[in-house]
């Protein structure tokens, strides 16, 4: 049935993932930017799972990103510097936080939901700021160094860092792809469209939403942990409202609910920021604002949605 | 101890008045059209910068600039409503959030371009400076003025909502928009006026707040959180609710800063999250 047709890998997808290897050869001096992009793409992918597929609008998703980042940083600073186990623990702890919060979040909709997710994000950021003894407060967490992963050292060009970030992104992408094409993923989309009708056909809305929220929290935590391990520092910015807003912009720009939307958005956003912010960092947000207005008014489904519509029309 | 508590109450009340002026427009427009307007504090910024420019560069007296701040912000709100917002009344919460946060970003960058990112101040008349002393208590003239002014505006607003034709239309539209349309009320027109009025009040609040909290281009984002808290706690479309919520928030914020300075904004966010979990529709929300 069409189920199987959806899960088959299309040639364009294979080409896309092969292209992610190009920075190694084409732009070796931009590899640290490339790993930033991969981390941001993973973060956006995790938001896509709850916003694009399950329809939970979150203005505080950075809470999980920052929680993972700080967990990985604390492990590296006080215990051990082996990254893979720390990565797993960071993801798990972010997942536990997500599971705890999911019980509250799934009960609300509309403005209360947006305000609550934002409130939790702000609370966590304030807590990290106040707990100076543990997190380093506004100075951030410093004084540790993750030497390498699986015997490869993190070099100054960021080759290992990019390979590491890309591998984590690809693995999480595979899991996401599997999830959204499973019956569970279809049920999530059903809940997004109508949360009260889905229980009638045997899909418990709140339990499904809790699961999706927890999985997204794990992935956001992983993204944060990779950032910590590749840059050897954690700043308060990982928990900030700005990061939550940025990732939302990225996802909407690329196209929510489309799996590749967050990744495409991350590539465009990060490259544009790298190019423009050198010219006038202060006015970067002017362009972001303009893009947001334009996307909402003219491209309601993001770039991927627009391309899709154009492609269908051309056919 | 007692006098410090009275001082906190007084300062918090004055601060709450500001928050009320800033947020009441958003509360009513949200209640009428369910339009999530995150750009509300950008209107406040329009009014604040208008006052600052008129006083600082053109030498106008402070009080004379207040009507200009109101009209300026109202006109900007009206224009944005006609061009952008009216197209999105039926769109999802997310689209509305994104469009308006985009406008916030643009306004911040635009004001940073014209006025730099420096903290601005405004010169207020001599008779508003200084304070009255009663024992150990000090009542700053400006804060007394704020409270009197805020109460007067509130009375006017309540009179308008309760006693005028426009007010009746607004109340009907907040209660049940579809029914109001069915009765022949031009909800879009009433909404347009309400939106402009709400924007104007925010502009007034912005102009009055320069003296108390300063002004820089991030104002639109910093105070957005406070305004949203007031609206979310007070309940949509409820003027009385907004008033109580603004006063409670103003006093608890002042008390938090005075008694628990190390907690920072943590206390405010905790109050917001707790109240929202308890009453998701706000303390006075009907729907």
Image: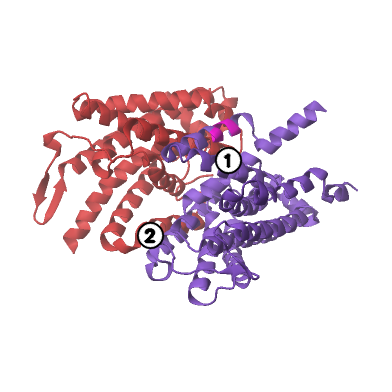
Report the front residue among B162 and A189: A189
Protein image colouring: by chain
Q: Quadrant of residue A153?
A: bottom right
Q: What is the C-alpha distance between the residues marked 1 and 2?
A: 27 Å
Label 1, secondary structure: give it: helix
Residue bearing mark 2: B267
Furthest residue to the right? A1
Circle 2 chain:
B
| Chain A tint in image | purple
The answer to whether residue A273 is magenta is no
Tell me whether the residue at label 1 lies in contact with that at label 2, contact meaning CB atoms closer than 8 angstroms. Answer: no
Going from the N terminus, do you reach mark 1 or mark 2 first? 1
Residue bearing mark 1: B93
What residue is rendered at 61% in x and 50% in y?
A28
Q: Quadrant of the C terminus of chain B?
A: top right
Residue B60 bears which disc, if any? none
| Chain B tint in image | red
Q: In x, y percent, where is residue A35?
A: 60, 54
């Amino acid at each position: 049935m069409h189920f199987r047709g959806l899960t088959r890998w299309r040639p364009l997808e294979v080409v896309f993932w092969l292209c992610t290897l190009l920075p190694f050869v084409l732009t070796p001096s931009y590899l640290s930017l490339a790993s930033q992009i991969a981390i941001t793409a993973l973060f956006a992918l995790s938001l896509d799972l709850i916003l694009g597929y399950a329809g939970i609008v979150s203005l505080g998703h950075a809470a999980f990103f920052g929680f993972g980042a700080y967990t990985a940083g604390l492990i590296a600073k006080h215990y051990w510097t082996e990254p893979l186990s720390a990565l797993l623990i960071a993801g798990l702890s972010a997942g536990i936080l997500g599971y705890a919060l999911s019980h509250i979040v799934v009960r609300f909709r509309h403005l209360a939901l947006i305000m609550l997710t934002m409130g939790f994000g702000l609370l966590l950021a304030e807590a990290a700021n106040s707990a100076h003894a543990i997190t380093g407060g506004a100075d951030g967490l410093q004084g540790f160094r993750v030497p390498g992963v699986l015997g490869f050292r993190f070099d100054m060009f960021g080759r290992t860092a990019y390979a590491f970030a890309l591998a984590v992104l690809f693995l999480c992408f595979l899991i996401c792809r599997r999830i959204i094409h499973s019956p569970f993923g279809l049920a999530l989309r059903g809940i997004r469209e109508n949360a009260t009708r889905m229980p009638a056909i045997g899909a418990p809305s709140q339990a499904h939403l809790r699961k999706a929220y927890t999985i997204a929290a794990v992935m956001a935590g992983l993204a944060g942990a990779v950032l910590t391990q590749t840059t050897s520092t954690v700043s308060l910015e990982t928990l900030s409202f700005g990061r939550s807003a940025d990732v939302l912009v990225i996802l909407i720009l690329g196209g929510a609910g489309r799996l590749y939307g967050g990744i495409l958005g991350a590539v465009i956003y990060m490259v544009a920021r790298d190019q423009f912010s050198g010219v006038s960092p202060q006015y970067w947000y002017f362009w972001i604002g303009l893009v947001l207005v334009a996307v909402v008014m003219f491209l309601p489904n993001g770039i991927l949605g627009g391309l899709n519509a154009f492609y269908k029309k051309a056919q | 101890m007692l006098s410090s508590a009275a001082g906190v109450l007084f300062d918090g009340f004055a601060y709450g008045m500001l928050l009320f002026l800033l947020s009441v427009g958003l509360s009513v427009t949200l209640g009428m059209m369910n339009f999530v307007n995150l750009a509300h504090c950008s209107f406040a910024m329009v009014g604040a910068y208008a006052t600052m420019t008129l006083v600082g560069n053109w030498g106008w007296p402070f009080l004379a600039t207040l009507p200009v701040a109101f009209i300026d912000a109202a006109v900007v709100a009206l224009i944005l409503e006609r061009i952008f917002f009216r197209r999105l009344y039926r769109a999802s919460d997310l689209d509305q959030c994104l469009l308006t946060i985009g406008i916030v970003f643009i306004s911040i960058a635009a004001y940073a371009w014209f006025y730099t990112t420096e903290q601005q101040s405004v010169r207020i008349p001599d008779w508003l400076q200084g304070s009255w002393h009663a024992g150990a208590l000090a009542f700053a003239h400006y804060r007394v003025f704020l409270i009197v002014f805020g109460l007067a505006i509130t009375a006017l607003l309540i009179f308008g909502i309760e006693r005028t034709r426009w007010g009746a239309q607004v109340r009907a539209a907040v209660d049940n928009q579809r029914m109001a349309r069915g009765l022949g009320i031009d909800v879009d027109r009433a909404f347009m006026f309400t939106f402009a009025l709400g924007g104007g009040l925010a502009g007034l609040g912005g102009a009055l707040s320069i003296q108390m909290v300063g002004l820089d281009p991030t104002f639109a984002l910093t105070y957005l959180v406070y305004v949203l808290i007031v609206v979310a706690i007070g309940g949509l479309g409820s003027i009385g609710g907004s008033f109580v919520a603004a006063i409670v928030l103003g006093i608890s914020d002042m008390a938090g800063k005075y008694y628990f300075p190390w907690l920072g904004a943590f206390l405010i966010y905790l109050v917001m999250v707790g109240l929202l979990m308890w009453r998701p529709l706000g303390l006075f929300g009907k729907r």
